[in-house]
Amino acid sequence: WNAERRRRRRRRRRPRRRLVSSFCYCLLFSSELWSVNRAWRGLAKGTLSYVTPLYQFRHTQLKSYSRQLSAFIAAEKQEGLAVEVGGLQNTFKVSFSVLRFRQEDPPKTVWCGWLSCINGNPEYLQSLPKDFTCLPLFCSKGAEDLSSLVKSWLQRTFDCCFGPLDINQTTLQWLAALWTNCHMETNIQNLKMIWTLPVLPPLQVTYTVDSDDVLDLWRSTRESSAEKSREAEDEVCIDFSEVTRFMQGLMSHFYRHFRVDLSAGELNQVSSALGSAKVNGKIKISSSRYLISIFSLLTECALLKMPI
Amino acid sequence: MDNSAKHLLQRLVRRIPVSMLKSTLDKWERLTAEKRKSLDFTQSKWIITQELVALYITENPNQGMWHTFQLVEPEDDAHSVELMQFKELFKSHLRELQRNVSVKIKKHTDQAVWIRVAWGDGLSSPNHLKATYVVLYLQTPYVFVNALSSKHKPLLLQALTLSTRHQQIKAANLSGQKLTALRDLLMRQYQQVKLRVEKVQAEASANRHRMARETFGDGMLPALQSAVFKLETKFKGPTNEAMTQRDEPFICSVKFSSSNLLESLRHCASSGIASTPVTPMLSSIPLKGRNYFVITDNVLTA
């Protein structure tokens, strides 16, 4: 695939293209697969968690895992742990190999999730003991009780643990810049940002900027940097200082009108027609553009959040 | 203690037998009991003499000539320098600059840090009878120095600057015989500066609170929940020339929401998150009783 490289920090080394197993394959296949099977769109939505490295996860065992998880869920159901599967009472199919999706449209997906690691920090990955597979980013979409069951099974099978992934301010700012950049090719309609200010009672500020105007602002912050913005499809380099200048431009326009300093608060949400991301880990991605970059950012978030 | 007195003391100590030295000093009564206890009589008489001189000077600081210096341009961690750290830094810096030097640092009960530096050159050992005395208070920028020769001055000042984590030191144009007087004068002035700064801050806060109340009102406010501003003004950003020169408006909309918007805005003003005086954009909400505004450049300048 054509990797879109993002040079984010001056001292960052090019990450080795560390191949990840199973679930992730689906997301690495870029636009081709995306346009072929629009069922994929549903996958890029849900709540994110981080997950610690999986012990003895073998991507050759996916069929076995499917069977095991299926049995586990059935057993928990029998014990009365309510699992509403809406109509599908006894036949319960768990599918672990994402590649399968190409061939069959699932009749009714009541829950789906994925584990992923995109451009994870190579030093960290190399430091892991041999038997551990690092897929730190977990996304789940569907009934909450099913999510707990799946996590619980993963925890006991692979000796890992889960935790909520707070998408940090830096990542949200990156997403704002990336999505704005996308407006050159795809209409993002507008860029919406939601801040919370620490007053009593808490004040929420929703700042929505017209797509053409925000793109002009983004372009102006890029022109002032040494690198001219290249409009080639597959190679865009964005420096975080450009993202910072972009955000400062937005905040200073706001300040000139309201004399309120947004940086005193916290950015909670960023959204556009291409997707949305919230600080509580809820994510929705509606376009395959910059998918690799977005998941790289989220992987980095997950690795940072991990307790080990 | 002038030189003749020091020499007299030296000769006296040399002549008095060691066994009688302690009792003689007790009878002398010029040193406090505590200080006498700190003397180690197993050391050589030469060292005992030096200690006596040092003790005497610290007990009677209003002699000789003290010169004041001020440390300027503190580094970020200047305020958190504490005694142990200072001691190590000072000794190591000074020794780097002049190898043959003897440094003794002690903290007195009144928070003053006394430093005695005995200088030696390549051949002779440090001379404690001609030592330099330095007094400083760690949380203040003032340093008092006694008996510092011009030869050693740059070395001492550099060591002081580095070990207190400042970038420069300058002469404070304050000298005199009475250390206590110099110290009191400066400390009072320093206290005044600190108090003034605190007062200014308190006044600013009181002002903000007052303006917040004047704009939004006192007590319970009507529980308005949102306000929307549609902005159609030109881009305003201090550092972005390209956007500021643009003719077209920067179209955006801002929605403020809260369980009680007016209270939130009042709190923004009193806490400084919103600069005071409050902009007419926000004060229009309670003043005009509206919560939907379309702002164009004409409206803004009006």
Image (cartoon, coloured by chain):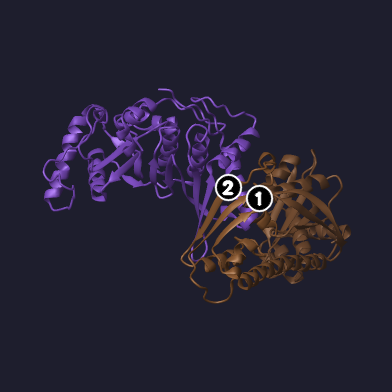
Chain colours: A purple, B brown
Q: Which of the pair B113/A263 is nearer the observer?
A: A263
Q: Which of marks 2 and 1 is nearer the N terminus?
A: 1
Residue B69 in picture, x, y percent from top left? 81, 55
Residue A59: quarter of image: top left
Q: Is residue A303 toward the left or the right of residue B298 in the image?
A: left
Per the image, the residue denoted by label 2 is: B251
Q: Is residue A263 above or below residue B246?
A: below
Q: Do labels 2 and 1 share a chain?
A: yes
Question: Could you tell me which residue is drawn at 44 percent across and 41 percent down?
Answer: A273
Query: Which residue occupies 67% across, 57% down?
Result: B300
Q: Residues within 10 Å of mark 2 (few under 14, many from 20)?
A: some
User: What is the chain identity of the residue bearing mark 1?
Assistant: B
Report x, y in % for residue A306: 39, 43
Q: How crowded is mark 1: few (under 14 residues within 10 Å), some or many (20 or more)?
A: few
Residue found farthest to the bottom: B219
Q: What residue is at 64 percent from the left and 61 percent from the top? A: B275
